[in-house]
Amino acid sequence: MTTLTIYSRPGCHLCDEMKGVVKRAMRPMADRVVLREIDISGDPDLEARYGVEIPVLLIDGRKAAKYRVTEDAVARLLTQPPGEIG
């Protein structure tokens, strides 16, 4: 099972856009992929790490994209061997 993680915060239009793109891209492989959405607001450590870069997409814990990503790019990332992401 592949885990996609999106770090975001409420009121972030880029975050909402990335969430929609990722959800559409993962539909064909929904049985093999799980999406975690993490709100960084209120967590000082996450704010310090990701505050100016959100949204950030991780695939199995490895940074894969930030700010914007396309459905095609997510699909490609999900078909790459784990060591080649990032």
Image (cartoon, rainbow, N blue to C red):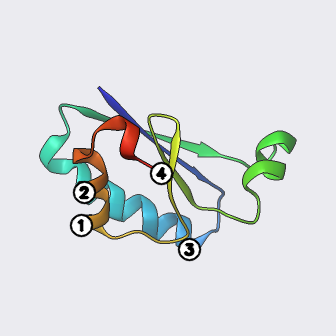
Q: Earlier in the sequence, mark 2 or mark 4?
A: 2
Q: In the drawing, does residue 81 fall left or right of residue 63?
A: left
- Whether residue 41 is visible here, answered yes or no, is no
Badge 3, how many Cα within 10 Å: few under 14, some, many 20+? Answer: few
Q: CA distance from mark 2 to mark 3?
A: 24 Å
Residue 3 percent location from the top left of the image? 39, 34
- Inter-mark Cα distance, 4 to 1: 16 Å
Of the image marks 2 and 3, the number of the one nearer the N terminus: 3
- Amino acid tagged 4: Gly
Comparing labels 4 and 1, the label whose residue is closer to the camera: 4
53 sits to left or right of 75: right
Q: Quadrant where the N terminus lies?
A: top left
Is tag 4's residue or tag 1's residue first in the polypeptide sequence? 1
- The residue carrying mark 1 is 72
Looking at the rendered structure, the kind of residue marked 3 is His
Return the residue at label 3. Answer: 13
Mark seen at residue 76 = 2
Q: Nearer the viewer, mark 2 or mark 3?
A: 2
Q: Earlier in the sequence, mark 3 or mark 4?
A: 3
Q: Is residue 71 visible?
A: yes
Which one is closest to the eye, mark 1 or mark 3? 1
Q: Which secondary structure lies at badge 2?
A: helix
Q: CA distance from mark 1 to mark 2?
A: 6 Å
Task: Give coordinates of residue 4: x percent, y percent.
Answer: 41, 41
Cα distance, mark 1 to mark 3?
Answer: 20 Å
Give whichever of 71, 35 is nearer the camera.
71
Amino acid type assigned to the residue bearing label 2 in the image: Arg
- Residue marked by disc 4: 86
Residue at 55%, 70% in the rendered image: 67
Give the crowd class for mark 4: few <14, some 14-19, many >=20 residues within 10 Å. Answer: few
